[in-house]
């Protein structure tokens, strides 16, 4: 197995001290770089492991933070924090830009070859970076079919891949349709994959605290969604020596 290295990085964003997880591939040269955004509960070992998996594939990867080092297990508290955030594109962009600045400042990262991948709230942050016109090579989201302010999707400069469960009550068919209409009207190179029978956060392994209604793990589709994200990066942000 390729030897990777990891470290914790602290940086300011959203009036908090964020604590991200940076994973570096073996070697010494510059590599393409990927932001990874977490579900609304916040950064967990799930996203840390995904950053490490991308590092093993040759990417510099930063799993970014949403809540100043906290993992918000209580669903009501998570909703109370995330709903105002999701309603405020500028706040989301601030969180995304702060993490992207850390990633691009890493000497191993090629600042001109970056992508953003995210889940739930973290995926909404990735999309807002695109709508802000950030130079990204790819955006990938799961459970994050959020729409933006009118006309701003036209600023997206890269392919967008989105995955969602067919039975996700938080991202229902009407939300899928609105997202697709926004991407299409803006002329974005977009794809939407609907995973049959899957609930919200289907990609996330089972948790040891109570999950809200409509949330559940789907092991097969979780693996498929990860393969789809890796394929997106391989297409749009290939690792070359």
Image (cartoon, grey):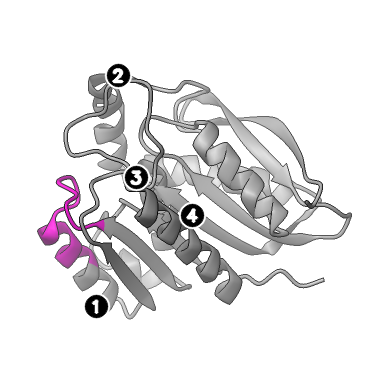
Instruction: Tell whether position 92 is magenta.
Output: no
List x then y, in percent, for residue 2.
Answer: 79, 52
Residue carrying label 3 = 120
Residue carrying label 4 = 117
Q: How far, Cα to Cα, is label 3 from label 1?
A: 23 Å
Span highlighted in magenta in the image: 165-179
Q: How far, Cα to Cα, is label 3 from label 4?
A: 10 Å
Q: Secondary structure at mark 3?
A: loop
N-terminal of the pair, mark 2 or mark 1, is 2
Residue carrying label 1 = 185
CB under 8 Å between discs 3 and 2: no
Q: Residue at x 32, y 65 (%)?
A: 152
Is 74 positioned to the left or the right of 234 in the image? left
N-terminal of the pair, mark 4 or mark 1, is 4
List x then y, in percent, for residue 148.
Answer: 27, 57
For the C terminus, the image quarter is bottom right
Q: How far, Cα to Cα, is label 4 from label 1?
A: 22 Å
Instruction: Tell whether position 171 is magenta.
Output: yes
């Amino acid at each position: 197995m390729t030897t990777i290295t990891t470290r914790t990085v602290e940086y300011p964003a959203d009036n908090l001290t964020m604590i991200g997880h940076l994973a570096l591939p073996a070697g010494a040269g510059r590599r393409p770089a990927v932001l990874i955004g977490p579900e609304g509960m916040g950064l967990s070992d799930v996203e840390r492991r995904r950053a490490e998996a991308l590092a093993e594939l040759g990417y510099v990867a930063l799993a970014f933070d949403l809540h100043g080092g906290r993992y918000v297990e209580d669903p009501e508290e998570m909703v109370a924090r995330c709903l105002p955030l999701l309603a405020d594109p500028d706040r989301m962009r601030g969180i995304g830009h702060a993490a992207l600045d850390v990633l691009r400042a890493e000497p191993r990262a090629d600042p001109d070859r970056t992508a953003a991948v995210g889940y739930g709230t973290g995926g909404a942050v990735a999309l807002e970076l695109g709508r802000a016109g950030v130079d990204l090579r790819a955006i990938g989201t799961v459970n994050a079919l959020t729409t933006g302010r009118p006309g701003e999707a036209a600023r997206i400069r890269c392919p967008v891949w989105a995955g969602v469960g067919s039975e996700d009550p938080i991202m229902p068919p009407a939300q899928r349709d609105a997202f697709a209409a926004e991407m299409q009207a803006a002329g974005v190179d977009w794809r939407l994959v609907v995973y049959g029978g899957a609930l919200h956060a289907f990609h996330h392994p089972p948790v040891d605290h109570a999950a809200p209604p409509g949330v559940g793990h789907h092991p097969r589709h979780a693996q498929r969604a990860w393969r789809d994200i890796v394929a997106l990066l391989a297409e749009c942000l290939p690792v070359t020596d």
